[in-house]
Each structure stands twice: as structure tokens, then as C-alpha cells.
Amino acid sequence: MQKQNVTTPLSDRRGVGGEASLALIPVMLCFFCMGFVDLVGIASNYVKEDLGLTDSVANVFPSLVFFWFLIFSVPTGMLMNKIGRKKTVLLSLVVTVVSLLLPLFGENFGIMLVAFSLLGIGNALMQTSLNPLVSTVMGGGNLASTLTFGQFIKAIASFSAPYLAMWGATMVIPEFGLNWRVLFAIFLVVGILSTILLFVTPIEEPPVEGKPSTFVECFTLLGTPIVLLSFLGIMCHVGIDVGTNTTAPKILMERLGMTLNEAAFATSLYFIFRTIGCLTGSFFLRVLKMRTFFIISVCMMALSMCGLFVGTEKWMLYAAIALVGYGNSNVFSMCFATALEAMPSKQNEVSGLMIMGLFGGTIFPLFMGLLSDAMGQAGAVLVMAVGVVYLFTYIKSLTPNPSPIGEGSR
């Protein structure tokens, strides 16, 4: 019988609680690097304009990024059992740095395909291993609020990407041949800094007790209904996230006649409200039942889909983008927490399965691109609305008051 891992807090192991706080600095910087994946929305719009692509072809880029979550997430959970969580995060940072370096040499179709593929692979490794690494550093103490703060740090990178792209496209950067691609150069510097800081930071990890799960055993966990339902919930969350990230500027361009540089604000608006949602969500999840807050979040997303589908006024479209940004901000954490609570002794394996759900970022944009080519951006909104409908059905899977994330894993 496999023993349950028990992670001892750093303050208990070393006698110095401040060392855990110091270790959190590079870990939080890694959350910022995790947000690099969200540049794919605005970047795909600029690549579409520069290379003259159709919606369905341009949407291959975000789909390609999230395709790798299907391939690498579960193997990454197994890799953590062999080499440790810190080394796995370091590997993800190296792959991410390479992905950010390539676009600086040009933006032809082939280079961008390879760059976005590596960005997806690196992010799959990072998303699977970074949350468990936080658990190692914190030793279970204040894990919920720490993960929520990490999502806030991630969101800063997400909403800064469109501004960096707009700045590069409209300021003096074109003289150096980078234009909007300056965001890759800036993120590259942060990625290198994060890699160095994490590498030199000592983090003690407890040994894995018992026999590590095999590949087949990991997938058999999907036979647990709540794990499968949470996996599908994360697929819908990410599909809506990537879909809004990619489609919101196109809706403004289609209905309000904005240029791409003007419409790029829509992506930042979405992530601004996602950031606000992450900050306030930590509070609301302490004072409200998770199920209640989940219902409120999904209702906001449903109102947003209505506004995005029929809206023709700027205020209505901006309000809809803000609603889906806030409503979608905590769905991942709630689904992730529910799955971890169901399988507390399989933390690495369940983490890999849940991150594999980010494959929804591949499926949704592909269908959205096809429908938007056929019937305009309203077709893309219809695809996202399907994800919202599923999240309504997920409500009955939530217990009235489940333990916060991390509680079940201790």
C-alpha cells in the first residue's frame, strides 16, 4: 500500500521560517513566467496581420501551444517523482527561454510554429510542476492563499503582454526590426533571471514514498468521476480563457471598426479583470462556500457570452469582456482544488491530469476559427458558450463546503 506523502514545512525542517519566504521569491517569479503563455492571443493576431492569414489558420498558433499539454502533462507528473519538482521547473524555464529567443530572429510561419510549440511544451512542464513545488516550499501552510497570489503574479504577465506588443508596434522599436515582438525580448530577460534565481535557491524536497505510479495508473485516475468532471471543467475554463484572449480584439475590429493596435486593449481588459478576480477570489472563497462562489462566477460568464454575441456598442462589449475575465478567474483553482481533495495521496499524478485539461486551449480555438470564418465572430462566441453550459452542469459535482486547496493533501 502506497504511503501518503507528508511535506514538512521548511520552517520546521530548518528552524528558520524566513527561509521559506526567501524561497518563495524565485517561485513567484516563475508564476510570472507561467503567464508568458497568454501572449499567444495577442501574438497570433499580429502574426495574422503580418502574414495575411485567415482566422482558422491564425488560430492554429494558440491551438498548437495548448496541444502540448495533452502530450506532456501526465509524463511531467511522473518525471517529478524521479528528478524532483525544482529540477522539473528549471527544465520548463529553459524550454521557455528558448521559445522566447526564436522570434527575435524573424517571424516567418515556420519560426513562429516552432516558437509557439516550445512555449507550450515549457508551459506544460511548468504548470504541472510549479503548484506542487509551492506545496513543498510552504509545507501545506497557507497554501491556498499562496497559490492564489501566484495566479495574481501570473496575471500581471498576461495583461502586460498586449501593452508591450502595442508599445513595440507604435514606438521606436521598429527601427531595430522587432516591432511588436519586443515583448519576446522583455519576457526573455525575465525568464533568464527566473532560471538563475531558482537554480541558486536551495529547496529541500521529501523523497517519494512507495512505488511511483505508472503511465497507465495515472490515466486510470480519470475513472474517478469527480476527477474526470474536474478535468473537463478545466478544459472548458482554458478554452474560454484562450478563446476570449484571441477573439475579443477581433470582435471589436469587426463591430466597431477598430485597428488591431486599438483593439488589443480588449485582451488587457480581460486580464485586468482576471487579476482583480484572483485578488478578490481569495477573500470570497474564505467567506463564501466554494459552490456559491462558483455559481456566481459561471452566471457572470453566461451574461458575458450574451453580451459578446449580440453587443454592438463599445460599453456593452467592454462590460462583457470584463465579466468573463472576472467570472473565469477562479474556475481553474476551484476545479483543481476539488480534484486534489478527491485524491490526496496522488498529488503529482492528479496535478498532471488536471494540467492536461489545458488541452482545451487547443480544441476551442480550432472550432472557433472555423465558425468565425463561416459566420463572423459570433460563431466563435457560440463555441465558448458551450463551455459555459458545461460549467453549469459541473455545479452539482461541488460539495457544499469542500476543503480549501492543499488541505486534503496534507
Image (cartoon, rainbow, N blue to C red):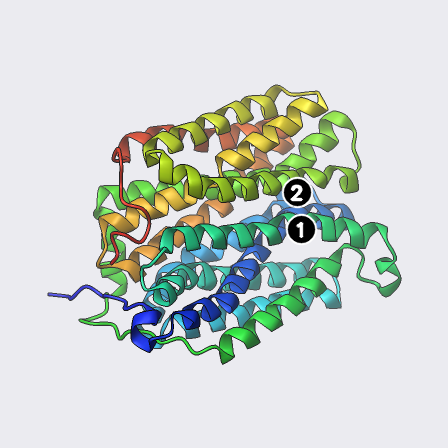
Along the line of sight, which residue is nearer the eye, 403 or 57?
403
Look at 23% across and 69% down and name the residue there: 212
- Left or right of 271? Residue 408 is left
Q: Is residue 279 visible?
A: yes
Label 2 or label 1, whichever comes before in sequence order: 1
Along the line of sight, which residue is nearer the eye, 93 or 14?
14
Measured from the top left, where is residue 147 in percent x and y? Answer: 43, 54
Image quadrant where residue 21 sits: bottom left
Look at 54% across and 75% down and name the residue there: 197
Look at 72% across and 41% down and name the residue there: 264
Residue 268 — which label? Answer: 2
Residue 177 — which label? Answer: none
Is 323 situated above or below 135? above
Secondary structure of the residue carrying tag 1 is: helix
Is 75 situated above or below 38? below
Residue 160 — which label? Answer: 1
Q: What's the residue type where badge 1 is placed?
A: Ser
Measured from the top left, where is residue 317 in percent x and y? Answer: 65, 26
Q: What's the residue type where badge 2 is placed?
A: Ser
Look at 50% across and 73% down and name the residue there: 198
Q: In the rendered structure, are the residues bearing label 2 and label 1 in contact, judged by CB atoms less than 8 Å apart? A: yes
Query: Could you give the CA–CA distance between mark 2 and mark 1, rounded to whole angstroms?
Result: 7 Å
